Amino acid sequence: MSGYGTVISLTIKPACAIFGRMDINWLGHSCFRIRGKQATIVTDPFPPDLGYTLGKTTADIVTVSHQHHSHSYDKGIGGDPRVIAGPGEYEIKGVMIIGIATFHDADGGKIKGKNTVYLIEIDGITVCHLGDLGHVLTTEQVEEIDDVDMLLLPVGGGFTLNAATGAEVIRQIEPKVVIPMHYKTPALKRELAPVDSFLKEMGIERPASQPKLSFNPSSLPISTQVFLLDY
């Protein structure tokens, strides 16, 4: 017998082959549809009277950041999804979700109550949905919300982050992708600031709006980029 062992040929698959591509669509307000290889997640579904439409959207998982009517219309989502509505750790269909307790206002929740920030790890990408976050993050919260690839960020003001505080939270988290949400559009029947105020605060030209974004871990930008999505 030879003194050499058996030679095994190993093929290293690229990240896109391991994870596939994650697609994200904005349905309006704070509601996104996130599609991965094994599961579809919908965040903060809204009722018809808000001005947007959910259509015949189905999901495996629905996250609800707080119980206000415009963020918790889970009955509008088909497919008998598992509804997550608060802090904790959840693993569903290969998706890891961590809910982190925050507040809807800058006064410790005394005005508008509590809010849950969700970290969603899907197909090798960590998405952070801030819900109706109403304050700059504490040091402890920044440590919990660590290594974010994609940040879904309210920027319309009112009882959530406005242009200036939204920009400050981006500096705290340092994500690779930022997608603004919860701002005034022609469809929305609420008074919020338009996204242009946030873009001006960030010092960037308005990017072309896209119907959806698709990423895998290797296709994420190296430094923070802001993307706009159609609803």
Image: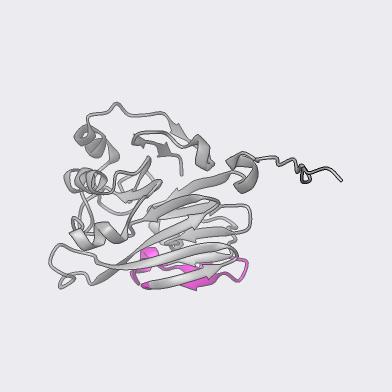
On the picture, is 226 further left or further right than 106? right
- Is 80 colored magenta in this rendering? yes
Residue 7, horizontal then vertical, whole percent: 76, 42
- Is 181 colored magenta in this rendering? no
Residue 154, horizontal then vertical, whole percent: 30, 51
Q: Main secondary structure of the magenta part?
A: loop
Residue located at (42% from left, 62% from top)? 44
Looking at the image, which is closer to me, 40 or 215? 215
Can residue 85 be seen here? The reply is no
Residue sitting farthest toward the top: 205
**Position of 8 relative to 85 (above/below):** above
Q: Tell me which corner region of the image, top left, top right, bottom left or bottom right, holds residue 15.
A: top right
Q: Tell me which corner region of the image, top left, top right, bottom left or bottom right, holds residue 82.
A: bottom right
Residue located at (38% from left, 53% from top)? 29
Residue located at (60% from left, 58% from top)? 56
Q: Tell me which corner region of the image, top left, top right, bottom left or bottom right, holds residue 135.
A: bottom left
On the picture, is 29 further left or further right than 41? left
Instruction: Describe the colour scheme in one phrase.
Output: one colour
Residue 180, horizontal then vertical, whole percent: 34, 44
**Position of 66 relative to 211 (above/below):** below
**Position of 182 relative to 2 (above/below):** below
Count of residue discs? 0
Residue 167, horizontal then vertical, whole percent: 22, 43
Residue sitting farthest toward the left: 107
On the picture, is 221 further left or further right than 56? left
Can residue 150 be seen here? The reply is yes
Q: Which residues are magenta?
A: 64-87
**Position of 214 relative to 92 (above/below):** above
Looking at the image, which is closer to me, 52 or 85? 85
